[in-house]
């Protein structure tokens, strides 16, 4: 396979790619379902509690 002479670091190119995607498309793809939101909320609450309890 033909390789470009310059390959940016994987992270940077991925970040750049994401930044170039229009915001509404990013929002569309990153739109969590209600179930995901609930799960994320529970996780966040759990983390917060853990942080306060085990300080």
Image: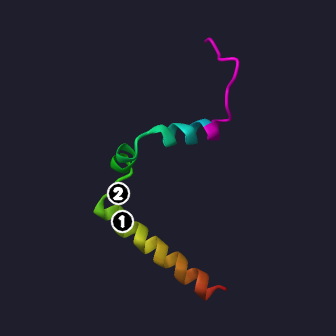
Q: Which residues are magenta?
A: 1-12
In the image, farthest residue toward the left? 34
Give the residue at mark 2. 32
**Mark 1–mark 2 contact, CB under 8 Å?**
yes
Q: Secondary structure at mark 1?
A: helix
Q: CA distance from mark 1 to mark 2?
A: 6 Å
Q: Quadrant of residue 7?
A: top right
Q: Quadrant of residue 13?
A: top right
State which tag comes first along the sequence, 1 or 2. 2
Looking at the image, is 12 positioned above or below residue 39?
A: above
Q: In the figure, is residue 2 to the left or right of 38?
A: right
Q: Residue at x 62, y 11 (%)?
A: 2
Name the quarter where the N terminus is drawn: top right
Q: Position of residue 39 (x, y in %)?
A: 39, 67
Q: Position of residue 24 (x, y in %)?
A: 35, 47
Label 1 packing within 10 angstroms: few (<14), some (14-19), many (20+): few
Q: Quadrant of residue 40?
A: bottom left
* Structure colour scheme: rainbow
Q: Residue at x 35, y 69 (%)?
A: 38
- Who is closer to the viewer here, 44 or 23? 23
Query: What secondary structure do most residues of the magenta stretch adopt?
Result: loop
- Who is closer to the viewer here, 15 or 55? 15
Name the quarter where the C terminus is drawn: bottom right
In the image, farthest residue toward the top? 2
Q: In the figure, is residue 28 to the left or right of 40?
A: left
Magenta span has 2? Answer: yes
Looking at the image, is 37 positioned above or below residue 21?
A: below
Give the residue at mark 1. 37
Magenta span has 11? Answer: yes
Q: Residue at x 39, y 51 (%)?
A: 30
Q: In the figure, is residue 15 to the left or right of 27?
A: right
Q: Residue at x 47, y 71 (%)?
A: 43
């Amino acid at each position: 396979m033909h390789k470009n002479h310059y390959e940016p670091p994987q992270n940077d190119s991925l970040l750049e790619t994401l930044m170039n995607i229009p915001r509404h498309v990013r929002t569309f793809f990153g739109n969590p379902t209600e179930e995901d939101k609930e799960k994320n909320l529970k996780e966040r609450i759990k983390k917060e509690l853990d942080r306060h309890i085990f300080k």
